[in-house]
Image (spheres, helix red, strand yellow):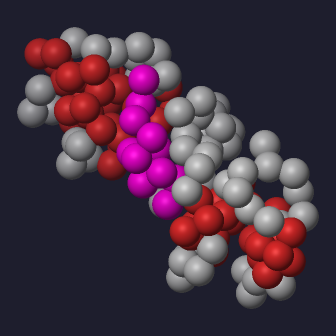
Amino acid sequence: MRRLAGSCHPLIRRSVARARHLPPDVVKRLARDEDRTVRLFLAESCDDAPPEMLLEVWSWWDGSFSHPDRPRSHPKFPRTGLLRYAGDPAGRMRRLARDDPASTPADVARLSRDPDAEVRRRAPRTPD
């Protein structure tokens, strides 16, 4: 897997990223891959994917039919520190603020008046 993860061919690296478990050095390498699809496949399939990469993938990926709600439902997706996104220009990132266990009723009230409909819809929900 180490050798394949270093392949110059993105299709090979994408295949490696689909593994459920990988050695830490391989995960680290694939999490920094220049090919977005490699990082996406790592987020969808690999239980060892790093939290910071999962957050990065969340910023641009809506999920797929085969892996709904990934990367947000990934066990390593960060839950704390998400309130910092409450003022983010991207509604997709503001949605995460509600998932932070430190969110307060005041945060929920503010998010329920957000200009983005999806942020407003998620605001009153109990975090998953």
Query: Residue at the location (59% across, 34% down)?
Result: 74
Quadrant of the drawing holding the C terminus: top right
Position of residue 46 relative to residue 56, above or below, is above
Q: Can the viewer see residue 64 in this picture? A: no
Query: Residue at the location (45% across, 41% down)?
Result: 51
Q: What is the chief secondary structure element of the magenta stretch?
A: helix
Examine the structure image and report whether residue 123 is included in the region drawn in magenta: no
Region in magenta: 48-59
Position of residue 17 relative to residue 86, above or below, is above
Position in image of residue 34 (x %, y %): 21, 48
Residue 5: name its quadrant. top left
Position in image of residue 40 (x %, y %): 43, 41
Query: Residue at the location (48% across, 60% down)?
Result: 60
Residue 86: name its quadrant. bottom right
Give 56 or 6, whichever is nearer the viewer. Answer: 56
Give 85 or 103, whichever is nearer the viewer. Answer: 103
Position of residue 59 relative to residue 46, above or below, is below
Q: Can the viewer see residue 127 in this picture? A: yes
Position in image of residue 57 (x %, y %): 45, 51
Position of residue 85 relative to residue 1, above or below, is below
Residue 18: name its quadrant. top left
Give 69 or 103, whichever is nearer the viewer. Answer: 103
